[in-house]
Image (spheres, helix red, strand yellow):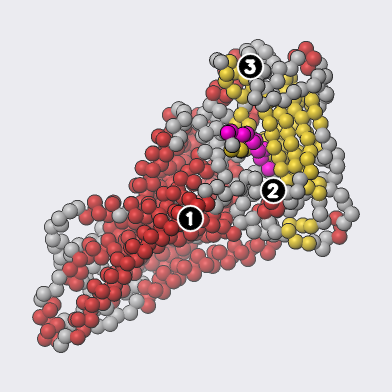
Amino acid sequence: MGFASGSGNKMTSFFGSAFWFLVFCCLAFLRSGDGFYLPGSYPHEYPVGEVLPVKVNSLTSIETELPFSYYSLPFCRPQDGIKDSAENLGELLMGDRIENSPYQFKMFTNDSEVFVCQTNPLSAEDFNLLKKRIDEMYQVNVILENLPAIRYARKDDFVLRWTGYPIGVRAANSYYVFNHLKFTVLVHKYEETNVAMGSTGDAADVIQTADKSRSGKAGWMVVGFEVVPCSVLHNLEKTKNLKMYDKYPAKVECDPTTVAMKVNENQPIAFTYEVAFVESDIKWPSRWDAYLKMEGAKVHWFSILNSLMVIAFLAGIVLVILLRTVRRDLTRYEELDKEAQAQMNEELSGWKLVVGDVFRAPSHPMLLCVMVGDGVQILGMAVVTIFFAALGFMSPASRGTLVTGMLFFYLILGIAAGYVAVRMWKTIKGGNHSGWISVSWRVACFFPGIAFLILTTLNFLLWGSHSTGAIPISLFIVLLLLWFCISLPLTLAGGFIGAKASHIEFPVRTNQIPREIPPQKYPSWLLVIGAGTLPFGTLFIELFFIMSSLWMGRVYYVFGFLLIVLILLVVVCAEVSLVLTYMHLCVEDWKWWWKSFFSSGSVAIYIFLYSINYLIFDLKSLSGPVSATLYLGYSLFMVTAIMLATGTVGFISSFCFVHYLFSSVKLD
């Protein structure tokens, strides 16, 4: 028996090929940008007096997390009927329902005391529904030129800002509705510039254009949209004969600190508005700055510094393992003569004893390959999506782009998932690729199947609540077609390539009889589960901002920080899994395959526990079992994806480490 040098070229080829698949997908997307522009990235200038379309989105509340249509309440309706705006896939999945509104502005034309409508006397059903929505703190979301209406309020020495305005308020056991809106539109004069395909959606870079057709055309661009809601008691006798857009016959005093329009059953409500245009120094590329003001930058940097300290600590341990322990043992062994080596072989201990079992096939190998394949797909989607978002290609100015991009990249990366899963399956089977079709099918159906089950269950709850967050049947059919017509064929294609590729040869032979694992002082799975605390420590601060964005209605746009945190998370997961795998091998536990996956994948347990903590302490106002079930269901979906992605990182790093370690101790 003796030791000789081994090579890891085929292993490097395996993971290198997977990497190039990701690069190919990215380049294909970039190439398609030759004829592609971002929605909202070109300024729209209006001459004085031209009509500005005002739209409304779904009613939203942080109390229930259930969006409802604006016209589900007794509000004024447009004269020409309700019309849905064209929405992309991401908007529909996020529950947005953008419709036209009865509000009508004319560029740079101030207007006041504009009568909109007087509703019919409130029925008992409408009265109770209006009270319920006020109790649940629902917000009205008005949109002008793709800008949500923003509301400012001063509290102590701080200026608070919200998007949208509340339907009404409850005071002294009575309900009051905000029936008069004071709009302020900030405009900037058109400067004969155009916005080219840029880096931040609306906040793209401005460059001079060669288009002479616009020269000499005076116009104004909308760069800000503010609203002040007021509750005003109108004289219903004076309004009953007025038509839409007539002048209200009296001066309307808008005081947001007082309420007057009480909601009563069998009593109509009159709605009015006023609009003022203000010239602003804000330029088109900066019009989203009010929404995207980054707060807590020091906290983000603290999160990154915290992650770097964890990485440095783990990197030190890895360095000790690789340079001091492993290299020292191999150097001492190679310096001995053959007789001394034979004697030393009889005294081997630790990881060197499991040389004949370390590459023994794990239990449930197909499931492991499927989960690793899905993890590659999810991780690749996250990296590519956040990368493009950090560059500004997925600005909040382009509604639904982030979700649409995630879905697009996930579908395309099915080819990488099939390739990695099938090639790993072929490697475990010693070069036999039989069953690769079954592996590819399961890769294509495992995580999407879990997602489909969770989201369908939650969708029934949304349907039962008549929420606009429910996915329509037509969209369900579209998603199924995308699944079976794009994702599945690409996964099978990737599996076919993986089946044709050469497998990774193990550097040592596996004994026919498995070695008995000595009794351990502590359960190995306890250490595996505890290892998830280290990756969780690198992201829990950033996780708070992400949760606030998802559930508190705040805009999240620090994708640069998120990209750094994601890279750090991948490094920590790899280091944690590598260290734990080495520890298990040192105690002669050769069953490292699944443990390496879950040592980093166990971070999902702590993220789910954090989600429950966030529900109890930060979303304590969340009302109703339906809302709590939706929250927990979406959290379960999220942590399942995180578990697969982080577990894949841990498994691949451990596989590379074990292959490298034993390629230097090859049995004759």
- Range covered by the magenta-colored residues: 147-156
Query: Measured from the top left, where is residue 612 in percent x and y?
Result: 39, 39
Query: Measured from the top left, where is residue 536 in percent x and y?
Result: 37, 51
- Camera-side residue of 157 and 446: 157
Which residue occupies the extreme front position in the image? 157
Tag 3 residue: 263
Secondary structure beneath label 3? loop
Tag 1 residue: 301
Badge 1 or badge 2: first in the primary sequence:
2
Residue for point 57% across, 25% down? 133
Query: Measured from the top left, where is residue 142 in percent x and y?
Result: 67, 35
Label annotation for residue 287: 2
**Which is in the foreground here, disc 1 or disc 2?**
1
Residue for point 72% across, 23% down? 271
C-alpha gap between disc 1 and disc 2: 26 Å
The amino acid type, in three-letter code, at marker 1 is Trp
Mark 2 crowd level (few <14, some 14–19, many ≥20, 10 Å Cα) = many
Badge 2 or badge 3: first in the primary sequence:
3
The amino acid type, in three-letter code, at marker 3 is Val
- Camera-side residue of 211 and 9: 211
C-alpha gap between disc 2 and disc 3: 37 Å
Question: In which quadrant of the rendered image does the N terminus lie?
Answer: bottom left
